[in-house]
Amino acid sequence: MVQSAKAWRWSSYRATAGYEENAACLTTEWILAGFDKIKSVAQQHYRDFVKAGKEQPSPWQGLKNQIYLGDDNFVNDMQRKLNSEQSLKDIPRKQKQAPIKPLSYFVDRYKNRDEGMAQAYLSGHYTLAQVGEHFGVSYATVSRAVKQAEKRKRACQM
């Protein structure tokens, strides 16, 4: 790895930032136009922009469902736009499912602890042990809560 974008000779950064001539195949004007009309000023703003980005967390940390970079509303909107007649059999399940809610959501959403634990586990995203650790109980306690929730659900369907 290199310590800076400037040090990576195969990057377009060096030409865009004004450190070297553009290669014939490289067009930097459209990138620089977003920073200023004057090329030298735009190049300085571009260098500052890249430098500031180095301190930011990786955008890949925010990746959802393996393909989306955006908040839960964006993910839901994109999934609604999928053609309902399109075959989804070739799309991995993880890419089709709703965004994963954090365990704190289940604590806040359900006032009854056992119901919150059951719903967290039944979401399919967490193990009994993970739910138990978050709620401060054993996995066996979570298992009992899940069984009770499933029993209540069956009773309601009768």
Image: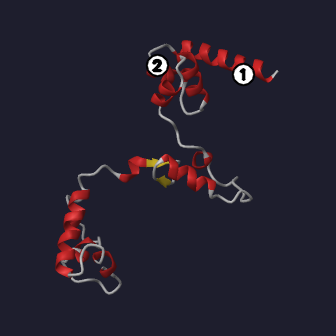
Viewer-nearest residue: 25 or 69? 69
Q: Position of residue 84 (x, y in %)?
A: 71, 56
**In-image side of 118 versus 45 (left or right):** right
Q: Position of residue 7 (x, y in %)?
A: 20, 66
Camera sees residue 117: yes
- Give the amino acid type for the residue marked by disc 2 in the picture: Phe
**Residue on which the image places disc 2:** 135
> Is residue 110 positioned above or below 88 on the image?
above
Crowd around label 2: few <14 · some 14–19 · many ≥20 (10 Å): some
Tell me the quadrant of the picture where the C terminus can be found.
Answer: top right
Q: What whole-number distance in Å separates the C-alpha atoms at marks 1 and 2?
A: 22 Å
Q: How is the image coloured?
A: secondary structure
Viewer-nearest residue: 132 or 158? 158
- Give the amino acid type for the residue marked by disc 1 in the picture: Lys
**Residue on which the image places disc 1:** 153
> Is residue 32 positioned above or below 100 on the image?
below
Q: Position of residue 76 (x, y in %)?
A: 56, 49
Viewer-nearest residue: 76 or 142? 76
